[in-house]
Amino acid sequence: MAERDFEIIIIGAGPAGLTAGLYTARSKLNVVCYEKLAPGGEILNTEHVEDYPGFELVGGQELAAKFADHAMKFGLKIEMEEVTEVKKDGDDFIVTTDMGVRRCGAVIYTPGGYPKKLGIPGEEKYAGKGVSYCALCDGAFFQDEVITVIGGGNSAVEEGQFLTKYGTKVYIIHRRDQFRAHAVLVDKIRENPKVEIITDYVPEEVIGDDREMKKLRIRNVKTDETQEIDATGLFVFIGFIPNTDLIKDHVEKDDAGFILTDQNMETNVPGLFVAGDCRSQLIRQITNASGDATTAAVAAEKYLEAQEEAKKAAAAAS
Ligand code: NAP
């Protein structure tokens, strides 16, 4: 068997990957973290974080930078490479990136996911011309304009609140009258004079001219009545698709496509650990991504130790 390049390869440098990197590097393991974009993951798209213990209020980008700096301080190598394949080869994993092929003993898979699309006419045509999935990235483009937001989860309500910094009016459009978002967030947004909440409606079509979005047509799910809102912005926050493609053939998943693990964050494939937003779990927060990644890091180290012990025992017996 060829030499291992690393003991552990971490795939994805969001809060989970960077926490796993911090713990494994601090344990003096030979570890690398591959990231195709910038370290930070989804928190790069979050303006303010106020539920990460010890930080009453911190910017998402600032927190991402702190995570990365902290892990690198203990020796984590973060390489900007896109992983294209993960394969098991005996006791090893072979991880292929756009820059090369590396062999390791365990993989900690933390690539997060991406936002769901509505799939309505005009959504694709006006993407970047009114339609967005990231308030922090694009909100400032909608200064003094009318903005629509779709969804009834925490993201829609939080991002809708954020968008009132820019829009003259923000419509939160939700397909039923009960919100998935925390009650405290819903209560807060109801008090915002710039916000109008429209329930029992779904978006039907994004309408515009050659250059940009001009209106959103919505339909009442109970009466089928439609109306058009004069709005130049549509922000879609209707959920999240986990990035599981790289290991889709190897692992067991739940009905929604999130990866199942045991309490050590290990999948049904020995040596393949998962933490963060692509894991099947009740909530997707920075705190539990970090906590689960800590478990994954320690469990991966113990897995490698057990593998070494077994090899030594086998060699001694032969
Ligand atoms: P989410 O909680 O799954 O909410 C998605 C929302 O979009 C739901 O209200 C859903 O309606 C609606 N929806 C789904 N498909 C739709 C469609 N095709 N058309 C119209 N509406 C549709 O997703 P999320 O808000 O992105 O949050 C993801 C996870 O991150 C959650 O666990 C959330 O708690 C967490 N999060 C937490 C915070 C925080 O605590 N500060 C902030 C952001 C996100 P139904 O309710 O009818 O299904």
Image (tube, helix red, strand yellow):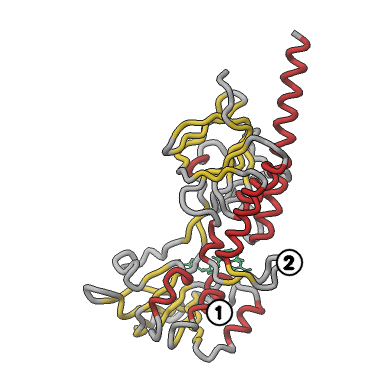
In screen coordinates, is 315 left or right of 168? Answer: right
Residue 268 horizontal/vertical position (percent) = 64, 37
**Residue at image x 31%, y 69%?**
126
Ligand 1, image quadrant it occupies: bottom right
Mark 2 belongs to which amino acid?
Answer: Gly
Residue 53 horizontal/vertical position (percent) = 73, 66
Q: Which residue is mark 1?
A: 177
Disc 2, ligand 1: is the CB inside 8 Å? no
**Residue at image x 75%, y 28%?**
306
Residue 14 horizontal/vertical position (percent) = 57, 54
Which class describes the residues within 10 Å of circle 2: few (<14), some (14-19), or many (20+)? Answer: few
**Residue at image x 51%, y 65%?**
45
Q: Which residue is mark 2?
A: 54
Q: Please determine whether, in this image, residue 192 is positioned above or below residue 272.
A: below
Q: How far is the residue under mark 2 from the one under mark 1?
A: 35 Å
Mark 1 belongs to which amino acid?
Answer: Asp
**Residue at image x 74%, y 35%?**
302
Residue 250 horizontal/vertical position (percent) = 55, 36
Disc 1, ligand 1: is the CB inside 8 Å? no
Query: What kind of element bears circle 2?
Result: loop
| Residue placed furthest toward the top | 318
The image shows a total of numbered marks equal to 2
- Quarter of the image for the N terminus: give it: top right
In screen coordinates, is 271 left or right of 116? Answer: right
